[in-house]
Amino acid sequence: MNHSSNETPNTSTKTSRARLLWFLMIPAVLFAGGLVTVAIRARNAKVLAAETQASAAVPVAVFHAAPGNANQDLVLPAMLQAFDESPVYARVNGYVAKWFTDIGQHVRAGQLLAVIDSPQVDQQLVQARASLNQARATLSLADTTTKRYQDLIGSNSVSQQELDQNLQNQAVQRANVQSALAQVAWLEQEQRYEKIVAPFDGVITERRTDIGDLVNAGNGGVGSELFRVSRIGMMRIFVSVPEAYSEQIRNGMKVNVGLTALPGQMFTGSVTRNDNAINLQSRTLQVEVDVPNPGSKLMPGAYAEVHFALHSAVSPLVVPSGTILFQAAGPQVAVVNKKQQIELHKVVLGKDLGGSMEITGGITGQDAIVANPPDYLVDGMPVTVQQSNNAQSN
């Protein structure tokens, strides 16, 4: 009986503690539930706000593109070159005995420029002429002997074999004479090469030799180039034209050439030919321009600017550079349509004018273009036009 009375208070205490624990947990659960509800409502509010902002019309300012100029002056750098330029080399080995022209002198084709002393060639020519005389004498003896044997063959004083041997010897001696003649002719030509002459009418632009210099035949060896002659009555210029303008270049078209050394002066030339191919590295077309130079004012090596007067078949439109959106799809322009919605138009860019850009395709002059468009504009987005300008170019 005592044992039963001791357990009753413990049981009552445990029951009280459980009730107290539940009493404290209920507010905690309610508080946590309230926090979750508040968080869900806040998230829903943000989503609703975002959807509301996305569906709201964006205020924009629009303008119409200004017409550009279809005619343009394309200016490209270049360097003047002589129409013909030739280095002059020696054709024989020897020493420079005399020279008669210096830099800046105008010469005619065939004019004597220098003389080379080549004693080896002279001596070989003397020897070749002596060999020719010897061969002729031997041939003369063979002719006489053969004629004599031909007279004796009728009386059987000589055999047919002896006559045939003399005829063969006569042919050999005649061939020796021809060989000696060729040797003499070759050495006489070598001796004429001792005189250095101008290959064409022009001006001496370089002299690289002096009296006593040892020169080598041909274009090999050190110091083998004696003179350089340039034909400057007509100048030629090679210009690299960018691929974007290559279709507008035509053979025969007139161009103007200006020189840094002669400010304010223009020289008229014409396009004579082009290589009909775009260089894979530079993406340019090589064009040759010929410029008459009767007064010799133009000099080879001078820096020049070539002016091409081009006319584009498509009249460009000009828009501010900030109007163009450069995105993954390429350059685009935001246009407001009649439904007051955004349309993104892909455009073809022309020349960069600094603060503005030429557009050669993708928009028209009647399109309402968004000025300074934000990057988040997408097709179909509603907008409200706050400002409209008839034209804007910068």
Image (spheres, grey):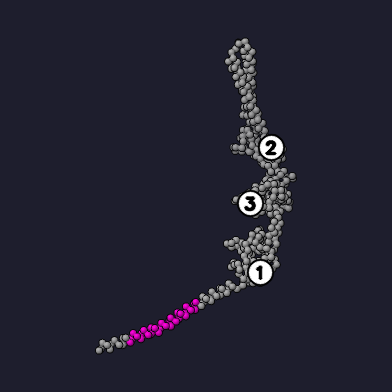
| Secondary structure of residue under mark 3 | strand
Q: Amino acid at mark 3?
A: Thr
Q: Residue at x 59, y 61 (%)?
A: 329
Label 3 sits on residue: 284
Q: Nearer the viewer, mark 2 or mark 1?
A: 1
Upstream in the sequence, badge 3 or badge 1?
3
Q: Secondary structure at mark 1?
A: loop
Of callouts 2 and 1, the N-terminal one: 2
Residue 338: which disc? 1
Residue 16 among magenta residues:
yes
Q: Which residues are magenta?
A: 12-40
Q: Position of residue 276 (x, y in %)?
A: 65, 48
The Cα–Cα distance between marks 2 and 1, rounded to whole angstroms, is: 77 Å
Q: Quadrant location of the C terminus?
A: bottom right
Where residue 198 is drawn, which disc sits there?
2
Few, some or many C-alpha atoms within 10 Å of disc 1 (few <14, some 14-19, many ≥20)?
Answer: few
Which residue is farthest left?
A: 1
The residue under label 1 is which amino acid type? Answer: Lys
